[in-house]
Image (tube, rainbow, N blue to C red):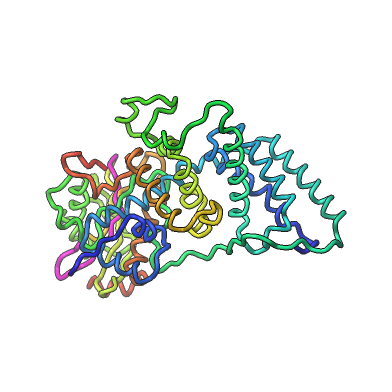
Amino acid sequence: MSRRDFDDETLMAFADGELDADTTAAIEEAMGTDDALIARVATFMESRAQASAALKPLIDEPVPEALTTSVHKLIDEAHQRERAEAGKQPAQKNIIAFEPRAPRKVTSNWALPLAASLAAVIVGVGGYLAGKAGGPASNGLAIASISNPVVAKALGATPSGTDVNAGDTTIKFVSSFRDEAGALCREFELHRASETSLVSVACRVGQHWDLRLAVAAPAAGQDYVPAGASETVDAYLTTTQAGAPLSEAEEKKALGLP
Amino acid sequence: MKGDDFPVSDRLVAFLPNLRRFAISLCRSRDLADDLVQTACERALAGQERFEPGSRFDAWMFRILRNLWIDQVRRTKTAGPREDIDDRQDIVGSSGERDVEARLTLKSVAVAIDELVDEQREVLLLVCVEDLSYKEAAEVLSIPIGTVMSRLARARKNLAEAAGIIPAADRSPEKGGKI
């Protein structure tokens, strides 16, 4: 497959959901095999999320009373003028019109804002991590999430909504669904005492479970469990056109449970 | 405009926190920002018939405020100290002094945003913080969309670098990719 080069502006537009459908599809395809591309897109997603988070406190800052009072006064004066001028011919509209904001497309919403405290990172798309075994420790943790026989076994045997404890690790099974290719996938969370939690998606390929995505969330106890981690997972699921969550019965059947 | 509603004045008070945030980030001073917000409100009310009902009120207000700010910057250009946009390419300490220590230390995102050059900061604010589209930001800033995109991409790369926003997938083992 020939690798296309995408410039920063294009990748940013992709991350922001501002790209046309064709280029979006091309980038999504390229991301399946290009780790560097994933990292570049992730940088744009995170810079947006973090900029937004960093300036969020300013919104909650109370507006100084003096300012509010002045503005109220200005408004009253404007209303008086308005009433005085009622009946006059309408002013001409020599203006720049801003279009009402269209709802964001959901087809490829990588731009979903990641939450504030999210130390979160897309460490894998399309089995990215599998090729990195023996890599940095951070990836090791993600790898451990499915190379651990307990986890691997639990993936194939635990209904969603159930927790499995293995030593100091708790695995919460969130949901099951089919990916675009029809493979059974599971979203699950890995909580380890005083360590980074992982929100992961793994899909069954043959007899194995392939890690598709692992998003790190700050350790529990520090702040709160960020909604952003699940938002990132949602963005991923949307992008990969994951099917709707399986019902309890469908999941049982897919897992071969009694 | 219909005489039976006051779309601008109705929305102005509720929008004050956003307007004030944009102003604070733009001029990096709460006092200046509050003056700016007040003047912008005055302008908006005086020209409210120029607001198209159904169009984006926030973009319209940001444009008014930003234009006022630009005017003010131009007017005070020769009066007193100001920061030259071109001199701010490097990361500088918040005191304005170049500081080796500061360059080695990762900055908080807020500080890194503060230290972006003005043209990058304003586009970052409009798109990433206030959620305007590229097109809307282009209209607020009176620049082509292509310019919005190139400034925004540079802003975000600079921000990522200054504040250490780098995906773990990008970290090499040598650098110790710790989550």
Instruction: Check the image and report above or below for B86 versus B122.
Output: above
Q: In the image, residue A44 lies at what x, y percent?
A: 36, 52
Q: Main secondary structure of the magenta part?
A: strand
* Residue A258 in view here: no
Q: Is residue A176 left or right of residue A3?
A: right
Residue drawn where x is 68% and y is 49% of the image = B12
Q: Tag count in the figure?
A: 0
Q: Is residue A152 left or right of residue A65?
A: left
Residue drawn where x is 62% and y is 54% of the image = B60
Q: Which residues are magenta?
A: A194-210
The C terminus of chain B lies in quadrant: top left
Q: In the image, residue B51 lies at what x, y percent?
A: 68, 58
Q: In the image, residue A107 lies at what x, y percent?
A: 40, 69
Most foreground residue, A57 or A98: A98
Snapshot quadrant of residue A183? bottom left
Residue A145 covered by magenta stretch:
no
Residue A196 covered by magenta stretch:
yes
